[in-house]
Amino acid sequence: MSSDLEKIKQREWFYSFDLPDGSTSKSYGNGELDAIHDTRKQMLDAVLGVHYPDGLAGKTAVDLACHQGYFSVHLAKSGVDSVLSIDARAEHIADTQLISGVMGFDNIKTLHSDVHALDTESLGAANIVLCLGLIYHLEDPIGALRKARALCKDVCIIETQVVPGMSGNVDWGNYQFVKPLHGVFGIIDETYETHGPEASITGICLAPSTEGLLWILKNIGFSRVELLTPPEGAYEQLKFGKRVMVAAYI
Ligand SMILES: C[S@@+](CC[C@H](N)C(=O)[O-])C[C@H]1O[C@@H](n2cnc3c(N)ncnc32)[C@H](O)[C@@H]1O
């Protein structure tokens, strides 16, 4: 057995990876998070299957906040030409390299970067941009979504925890100049959790409401925005709309 494969098998991972020897990597808490990853993978496959009926060959992808590269590997297995996997944590970049190396995917390239610092012009655009589990860990989620938009040629898939919405009108300066509310952001404290591998790197998080997210996506340059329907048996947060997955099209 390769020593890299051995290294993978000795540790616990955020994801349950199917390994080349037929085994699967040990995932957190004996697989307690596998359901959320499975639901998101199913929803991703469903939307890409409709958008690319002839398959993913010839398509390129960017995986923002790739973590250990689970969705990057999934896209590579599904036939995309190449994936650029980006994360702000160096340990995740190292893990993505380890996993993709053992799986034999030399078309997965990595970049260690904060999403806000990306030079989108020099990176160029990819057909598919994944932005899963990221924006509710950020203090500038709209800035990150603008980066995602700039990196996207066809479709961007955003998955996020959301907060309860609020609607109504706001007196904007005075009672005769009134504006409708298009959604809200909830302020969430991760300041004491920034050491956590899945958490924010600054600790100040703004989580959008669903309506707010859809409105923002339409207003930063996506022509069509679709709230995806969770499948039968979906992970509870997606089933009950506490997290949402959205496809935003150029
Ligand atoms: C909840 S995990 C989601 C990982 C993966 N995308 C998924 O959905 O399974 C959040 C990820 O965002 C990364 N992250 C947090 N802040 C970031 C930032 N400012 N720029 C890039 N990545 C960031 C973390 O390192 C972590 O990998």
Image (cartoon, rainbow, N blue to C red):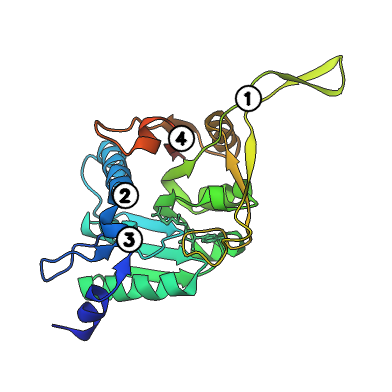
Label 1 or label 4, whichever comes before in sequence order: 1
Q: What kind of residue is marked 1? A: Met
Which residue bears the numbered disc 2?
37
| Quadrant where the N terminus is found in the figure | bottom left
Which residue bears the numbered disc 4?
242
Q: How far is the residue under mark 1 from the one under mark 4?
A: 15 Å
Q: Is residue 210 above or below residue 197?
A: above
Residues marked 4 and 3 touching at CB (< 8 Å) = no
**Total residue callouts:** 4
Q: Residues within 10 Å of mark 4 (few under 14, many from 20)?
A: some
Q: Cβ(mark 2) to ligand 1 < 8 Å?
A: yes
Residue farthest along the top direction in this orientation: 176
Residue farthest along the right direction in this orientation: 174
Which residue bears the numbered disc 3?
28
Q: How far is the residue under mark 3 from the one under mark 2?
A: 12 Å
Label 3 or label 2, whichever comes before in sequence order: 3
Residues marked 1 and 4 touching at CB (< 8 Å) = no
Residues marked 2 and 4 touching at CB (< 8 Å) = no
Q: How far is the residue under mark 2 from the one under mark 1?
A: 29 Å
Q: What kind of residue is marked 3? A: Tyr
Label 4 or label 3, whichever comes before in sequence order: 3
The image position of residue 155, as x and y in percent, is: 41, 43
Is label 4 or label 3 in front?
3
SS at circle 1 = loop
